[in-house]
Image (cartoon, rainbow, N blue to C red):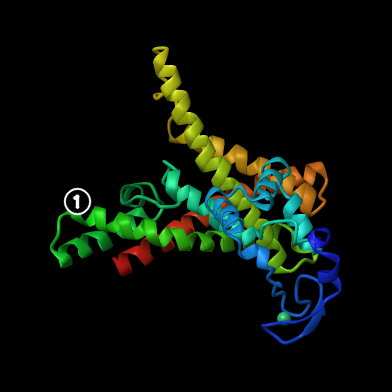
Amino acid sequence: MNQQALEPEQMNDQHICKVCCHKFSGKYCNRCGEKVVNPQEKSFRHFLGSLLNAITFLDSKFLKTLKLMVLKPGFVSAQVIEGIRVPYVKPISMFFVINLIYFLMAGSDTYNTRLESQLNQMPYSSMISGVVAQKIEKENISMDVFRVRYEQQSTSLAKLMLIVFVLFTGVFILILNVKKKLYFYDHLTVSLEFNSMFILIGNVVVQWFMFLLIKFMLLMDISLEQYLTDPVYTSFAVIIAVAILYFMQRRVYQDSVVWSLVKALAFIPCLAMSMIAYRAILFFATILTV
Ligand SMILES: [Zn+2]
């Protein structure tokens, strides 16, 4: 790769690696991977090019990986597990980029759960209301002041703690595919790709699509808001999760149509359990540090 771009004399030149002192030819050290810097790459024009890549994400590798993840779920994971990694952005990097997009623009509170949802909608809600009441009394503040503080802290913790959610779903993916004799690391790759797409499509895209649809229909004097309740959004999320996991089972684990569908459906309660555990951990991490 990239060797066509090299001048012939540079290809044959022997270099001493500046990091590990290994002797090598070509553009990259074959022991530690350090690159030979070409004076051309220090030009202002080159700098502007890298700057554009960094701020627009118009990196071809990024777009290629994203496109494959959206159009062919499981393909990138299957390649990475096979040992074909260089053509793609690492699943963990992809996950953190999508995580960032989610926290910048999602309207849903799936992952940065609001205090209201924690106190009223979770199976453990009745158990934690006492904890919140105690905290408010001890700090001698009003519920409104506490809510603001809580939600700021919860959102900043959620950005890192989402990886806990990836671990939980990775364990369930391992359990569903335990007979495939792969490493837990491989199942984590699948989990990272699954969660990246589930956050992007199931949360960001769906939320924005619905938001624009509501606005558009309002222009025509049709109100959709009474139909678009939480159960409707949950159903969309379930359909999207089943679809992504179905294709991942087909591509990564080479399961039959029926087995892929069975496992994708069995994954939904696993996803719900992971969500409950993640939210409970997020609640306690927040209340202990706020
Ligand atoms: Zn080296």
Instruction: Name the one closer to the observer, 69 or 54.
Output: 54
Any part of residue 273 in sight: no
Q: Quadrant of residue 88?
A: bottom right
Badge 1 amino acid? Asp
Number of numbered tags placed on the structure image: 1
Q: Say above or below: 32 vs 167.
A: below
Q: Is residue 55 above or below residue 6?
A: above
Measured as percent of width and height from the top left, residue 30 is found at: 79, 77
Which quadrant does the C terminus fall into? Answer: bottom left
Q: Quadrant of ligand 1?
A: bottom right
Q: Is residue 14 left or right of residue 157?
A: right
Q: Residue at x 67, y 40 (%)?
A: 243
Identify residue for label 1.
Answer: 144
- Residue 15 at x, y percent in the picture: 77, 80
Q: Nearer the viewer, residue 69 or 198?
A: 69
- The residue most toward the top is 220
Q: Residue furthest bottom?
A: 21
Residue 37 coordinates in the image, percent (x, y): 68, 71
Q: Quadrant of the N terminus?
A: bottom right
Q: Residue at coordinates 40% horizontally, 18% vertically from top-left? A: 218
Locate residue 12, reporting x and y percent.
Answer: 86, 73
Q: Residue at coordinates 65% horizontally, 58% vertically from top-left?
A: 91
Residue 187 in sight: yes
Q: Secondary structure at mark 1?
A: helix
- Is residue 183 positioned above or below 125 on the image? below
For this rendering, which residue is in front, 90 or 170?
A: 90
